[in-house]
Image: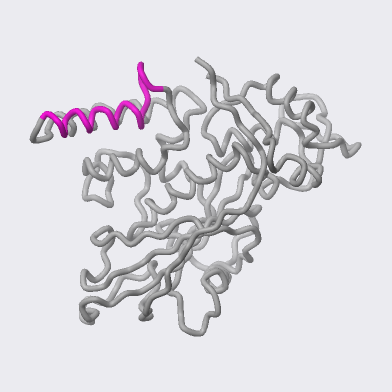
Amino acid sequence: MHAPSWHLLRGRLTHTYHAMPLHPHPPASAAPAASASAPTGTVTAELIAVLVAVTDGDPRVLTVEDAAALPSGPFEPGQHSLQAGLRTWVERQTHHPLGYVEQLYTFADPGRSTQDPALRAISISYLGLTREARPSGFTGVGWQSWYRYFPWEDQRAPDTAATAEALTGALHAWADAAPDAALRYDRQRRIAINFGGATHPWNEELVLQRYEALWEAGLVAEAGGTGAPGQPMAHDHRRILATGIARLRGKIKYRPVVFELMPPWFSLGQLQRAVEALAGRRLHKQNFRRLIEQQALVEETGGVATETGGRPAKLYRFRRAVVVERAVAGTKLPLAR
């Protein structure tokens, strides 16, 4: 079976946001006051950041509240744009400046968090790419592996891949408990597609679909369950993080977003490990390097570095012209099955 192609190129994504009356309320990272219910029909907009880095072959996300939430805050009347408001909240809560950022998704589903049921909250999420900086000194702020929240998404080794397989038993029990044959069939089909198996290969981009299936089955803590591993997050933040992971896994196939995550100089081994970390999958080493060379993505710096357990490795840097040259054609990086 042929593996999907992988690319390292980057582009811009736009998302339409329809403005509506906004009423400030506490940040998503703070529990709403039980004694002050909002008037029915109140609408608020929350800005939430999924800020990603890759450090030592591990995809990392910036969190607050002792790893339980993503940086966030309400869109306030004095903020002249959504992105400006997001930057204000992230820098205020973490002291980490935002670089490359794009709008991710807008969530408006009622009943997915602990917020006041009279309050209709619109969560406007953004994906930011950066390099991990030293801790800000703020209590509760830090970088966490995103596999801490989604251990079943790491398919790089047999023991971590087995986490996803272990979940399918509970999911099949959920499917079998459906009240009619049509719903049972639909659930079983979703499990096969989302979690892979004999008829469907593992698709690394279906992060959100896998989490939603576990949520519907009542297996994650946010839905009141205990069957699935992984640390829960406040409100609907783990769902938003799943959306960010899926977006980034898709984008590295055709846009050079990985450039934003690498240091100025790196070895080809470091580059491969970064892409594998994001994808949660292994890449074929020889094919990876051959395609890097064929498509002239990088150039040698003349320096070398000693990697653990190996001989000195040449250091490279990205050719910035690649961003323009490959924006249309793409750069294929095959995954090993």
In screen coordinates, is 184 left or right of 292?
left
Residues rendered magenta in the picture: 181-200
Residue 238 percent across, percent down from the top left: 38, 52
Image point 59% across, 59% down: which residue?
101
> Which residue occupies the extreme right position in the image?
302
Residue 198's image quarter?
A: top left
Instruction: Decide which of 157, 36 is in the foreground and name it.
Output: 36
Instruction: Decide which of 22, 25 is in the foreground and name it.
Output: 22
Image point 12% across, 33% down: which residue?
177
In screen coordinates, is 30 left or right of 217?
right
> Which residue occupies the extreme left position in the image?
179
* 238 inside magenta stretch: no
Instruction: Decide which of 235, 297 is in the foreground and name it.
Output: 297
Q: Is residue 165 above or below residue 83?
A: above
> Which residue occupies the extreme bottom position in the image?
78
Residue 190 percent across, percent down from the top left: 29, 32
Image point 61% across, 31% down: which residue?
6
* 196 inside magenta stretch: yes
Q: Is residue 61 above or below residue 212?
A: below
